[in-house]
Amino acid sequence: MKTAWSDEFYHHKDPTHDNGWDHIKLQYAEDCWVQSVIHENATSAIGLRCCKNCSVFDCQIIGNPGHNGFSISGFSHRNLIYNCKGGKQMHTYSIQDRVTANVFSTAF
């Protein structure tokens, strides 16, 4: 996935810099996966919110640095982020809100 975003990233400058060029957002998803996606020039690559039993694996962020790389938030439980490369995001891997039993493995 590639966006046309080319601005220099400034943390919390405005909504565009925080989430204007987001790629994949899963909400209230269960038993699903995202596999082998290369994210280029994303403010946020993949976000799981209120998800359960989801997997993200073999994904990579390249190009222009952005805000969040791979995030898990809301009431998300039992999710796996595996073998992902986070690039130069401000918050490469993040957990927010009330989440439990989530795993980030072989992530760099």
Image (cartoon, rainbow, N blue to C red):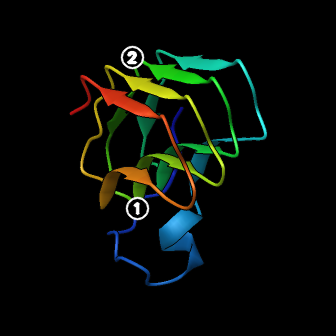
Q: Amino acid at mark 1?
A: His
The residue depicted at 59 percent of the width and 64 percent of the height is 20
Q: Is the residue marked by circle 1 packed among few (<14), some (14-19), or many (20+) residues within 10 Å? A: many
- Label 1 and label 2: CA atoms lie apart by 20 Å
- Residue 100 vertical position relative to residue 67 in the rendered view, above or below: above
Tell me residue 76's x, y (percent).
Answer: 62, 42
Tell me residue 35's x, y (percent).
Answer: 52, 15
The residue depicted at 31 percent of the width and 44 percent of the height is 63
Which sits in the foreground, 4 or 67? 67
- Could you tell whether 8 is left or right of 14 in the image? left
Which sits in the foreground, 78 or 30? 78
Most extreme residue toward the right, as rendered?
A: 28
The residue depicted at 32 percent of the width and 38 percent of the height is 62
Q: Which image quadrant: the N terminus?
A: top right
- Residue 81 vertical position relative to residue 88 in the rendered view, above or below: above
Which sits in the foreground, 58 or 37? 58
Q: Which image quadrant: the C terminus?
A: top left
Tell me residue 74's x, y (percent).
Answer: 64, 55
What residue is pinned by disc 1? 67
Res. 58 mark: 2
The residue depicted at 34 percent of the width and 69 percent of the height is 9
- Could you tell whether 4 is left or right of 74 in the image? left
